[in-house]
Image (spheres, coloured by chain):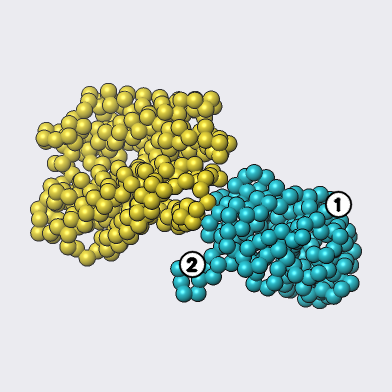
Chain colours: A cyan, B yellow
Amino acid sequence: MIELINIRKVFNQGRPNEFVAIGGVSLSIDFNKATVLRGPSGSGKTTLLSLIGCMARPTSGRITLSGREITSLPERFLTEIRQKTFGFIFQQFNLIKGVTALENAMLPAYPTGEKHASLKKRALHLFDLFNISRKTASRVEWLSGGEAQRVTIVRALINNPSVIIADEPTAHLDTKLSQEFMEIIARLKDEQKTVLIASHDPMVYESSVIDRVVNVRDGKVDEAA
Amino acid sequence: MIFHPSILALYVASLLISFMVLYSASYGVQILRKWDIRSGSEGQLILERKTYLISTLLTYAFGFELLSLFLFVFTVDRLHTFFVGAMCAAGTLYVNGFGYPALILKMVNFLLAGLWLILNYADNRGYDYPLIRTKYLLLLNLAPLILIEMALQANYFLRLKPNIITSCCGSLFSIGEQGLTSGMVALPITPMKIAFYLAMALMIASGLYFYRKGRGAYLFSSLSAITLLVSLVSILSFISLYFYELPTHHCPFCILQKEYGYIGYPLYVALFGGTISGMGVGVLMPFRNRKSLSEVLPLIQRRLTIASLVLFILFTAVVTYQMIFSGLILGE
């Protein structure tokens, strides 16, 4: 279980442009479930995802992962947790241009020091699983939106993380591709992955794949009916 | 005051080190008073973030501190040409009353800074800041010493007057003079040789025992410190004689000069490096049972032991080689 205890995140604290992005959130997220953080733009969904995914530190409060407190961890330990526990799917894909789809997908695994051959084998298997094997050698700028989305999913899964974090994953996808994405999420759930999605797309939060919807507004959360 | 590039470098370095240590010590006080890892308060999280900055600053500060000992000795050695009577660093240090106290304090701070770096290295390998209080407590004790060192060094350099006639190492480290150094110089050579090799042998044996069994860390650590003292006295008593091939020249500084291939630098680096590593093994010992360090600490201690043994053995090997192949034959 991921547990957030009275989390606050304030940007530019003490300055005239101080902004409270998250204001005292306590929340428990079960493993092996798909949870959606639903809310309008600027509500604090992405900030909350960044905090849970160890990409940012809260201003106050603690986060525990399987009972282990992670907000106080020194950076070297956070890096390890990010590598092993979380896979990220970003709204803007964040793929590196000029590099092939295969290389993009394998990048997060390079710091682990795994042998290139076994890493490539795993990446190719994932490309095959998501039906984009023919695009492995293509540069990412040549890919369509749906293909780029799948490459980011492969990249998120390359280190076999237990938690997948997706920030507005359908923002740049049409209806058909969004449906395909939700099918992929269903498949990930079947593989006992925990899925955490920030979205205000009804196709996401109304999907039968989703187990729980948490409303986020003005940096506060409340459980959806 | 002499405007020499090395003196200016030492000034700037000591000012920077003092500033960084003072800045860090102020956070050290807050950490010692307010640190509570169980709390998720804003203040605690700020301290957790700050400790990265402090740790990085101090790593550089104490890195400079280690280097500055050798730069200080190099500088005073180079300056001996300015003073009538001085032949090496020994004479330059004797120009005023601040030279030798500054050197001794630099040596003490060198050891303490090295131990702080070892504690910091170990602390950074634990996920819950296991040594945070210990390392900041050491820092708070070290801070006044760093400031005194800065004051002594500044006073020493500011009071260097080129018209002063000083003493040469031949008279400062000779038998018959009053003082501690003369007493050490006058120690009988054969018992000193026995003491030197016995100290080395015991220290190496205890180090190997700790490396293999994981026990006897405090013994090894204490013997490392004792070996440093015995070795420094041995340099005065008999080791220096073999390098100079003169039965009456006991100076510990002339071996830092070009005529002797600057052999003093690697010798002192090996001696002090070996001591810090050896003492570090004992310093880390009380923390082996901390959960977050239980796996990593034995590994660090083993590495320190190896480093210490290699450096001490290197020191002994160079000294022994010189004793065997020196043109000087000592008989008592």
Amino acid type of the residue that numbered disc 1 sits on in the rendered structure: Asp
**Closer to us: B197 or A129:** A129
| Residues flagged by tags 1 and 2 on a common chain | yes
Q: Residue at x 66, y 48 (%)?
A: A65
Q: Residue at x 27, y 33 (%)?
A: B233
**Closer to us: B133 or A110:** B133
Subunit of label 1 = A
Q: Position of residue A140 (x, y in %)?
A: 78, 72
Q: Give the mark count.
A: 2
Q: Which residue is mark 2?
A: A13
Q: Earlier in the sequence, mark 1 or mark 2?
A: 2
Label disc, if present, on residue A216 of the rendered structure:
none
- Circles 1 and 2, Cβ within 8 Å, touching? The answer is no
Quadrant location, the C terminus of chain B = top left
Q: Residues within 10 Å of mark 1 (few under 14, many from 20)?
A: few
Disc 2 is placed on an element classified as loop
Which of the 4 image quadrants contains residue A88? bottom right
Q: Residue at x 44, y 47 (%)?
A: B35
Q: Position of residue A103 (x, y in %)?
A: 76, 64
Amino acid type of the residue that numbered disc 2 sits on in the rendered structure: Gln
In the visual, does B184 lie left or right of B282? left
Label disc, if present, on residue A190 of the rendered structure:
1
Identify whether A60 is placed above or below B115. below
| Visible residue check, residue B330 | yes
Which of the 4 image quadrants contains residue A157? bottom right
How far apart marks 1 and 2 lie (CA) works out to 42 Å
Q: Position of residue B204 (x, y in %)?
A: 44, 28
| Visible residue check, residue A158 | no
**Closer to us: B166 or B97:** B97
Q: Position of residue A111 (x, y in %)?
A: 67, 55
